[in-house]
Amino acid sequence: MTLAETHPPIATTLQDSQENTWVNATWEEFVAISDAPASEKKTCYYYDRQMRIETMGVGPDHAADNGILHAAIVLYCTLNSIAFRGLINASYRKPGCKEAQPDASYYVAEKARSVPQGNTIVNLDLYPAPDLAIEVAATSLNDDLGIKRLLYEELGIREYWVVDVENARIFAFQIVDRGSQRIETSNVLPGLEIATLETALESRKKQDDSQIMATLMTQFSA
């Protein structure tokens, strides 16, 4: 009689030293951890046979910049009659090889009707990738500009923005043919100048959100 081969169970948690950094992992190992209940409030990424599970809490500066940027995009699209759907902290999965969870993502124009419904991770084999993905970097700037940028290049995103919270800067990239280059004006949101958004983020230090939005409304309506 031949005994069936047994394999040890796949771990569903990481050691503390393995969190908030890229570690080697198979896709199966990543899914076991990212889909586990313990990871519900964690941010999960997978790229090039490595996973990154982020557990750090979001501070007020990170949260404020994310909120202002989302409100600015909503305002700009509304005033310019641009159809859009925004998703905060949604996860996107290319089964077997890639996963990302940007701080914010947007489907624009005709894609606004393509946003899937439900509470499961967006399967990019079944649905299109968003047009714009945004990472807000309070402590992860180098990673957001490095490995994560490569990840988003391969997911089919049209634009990728990285917000440098400390310096109120936005690194905006247009992605074409799995490569990216810096841009000063958005193509996904036609005519929106990145510098205008940077000024809004800088204003947060002295103005409340209603004052910032009032200024943006005047600029966007001009």
Image: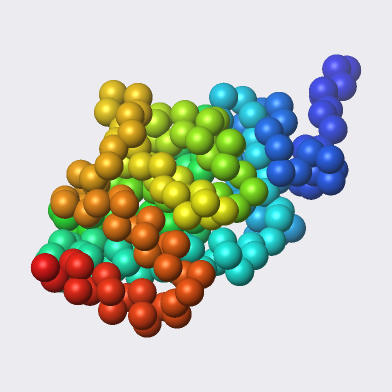
Residue at point 16%, 52% (across, down): 191
Residue 91 in view (yes/no): no
Q: How is the image coloured?
A: rainbow
- Quarter of the N terminus within the rendering: top right
- Total label count? 0
Residue 154: x, y in percent?
A: 40, 29
Say which quarter of the image contains residue 113: bottom left
Residue most toward the top?
2
- Quarter of the C terminus within the rendering: bottom left
Residue 75: x, y in percent?
A: 25, 70
Left or right: 34 with respect to 151?
right
Residue 39: x, y in percent?
A: 69, 55
Residue 213: x, y in percent?
A: 32, 75
In front of the other: 120 or 22:
22
Left or right: 187 with respect to 124?
left
In front of the other: 185 or 122:
185
Residue at point 43%, 57% (across, down): 104
Residue at point 48%, 63% (across, down): 65
In front of the other: 144 or 126:
144
Left or right: 113 with respect to 212?
left
Above or below for 59 versus 55:
below
Above or below for 134 versus 71:
above
Residue at point 22%, 74% (across, down): 217
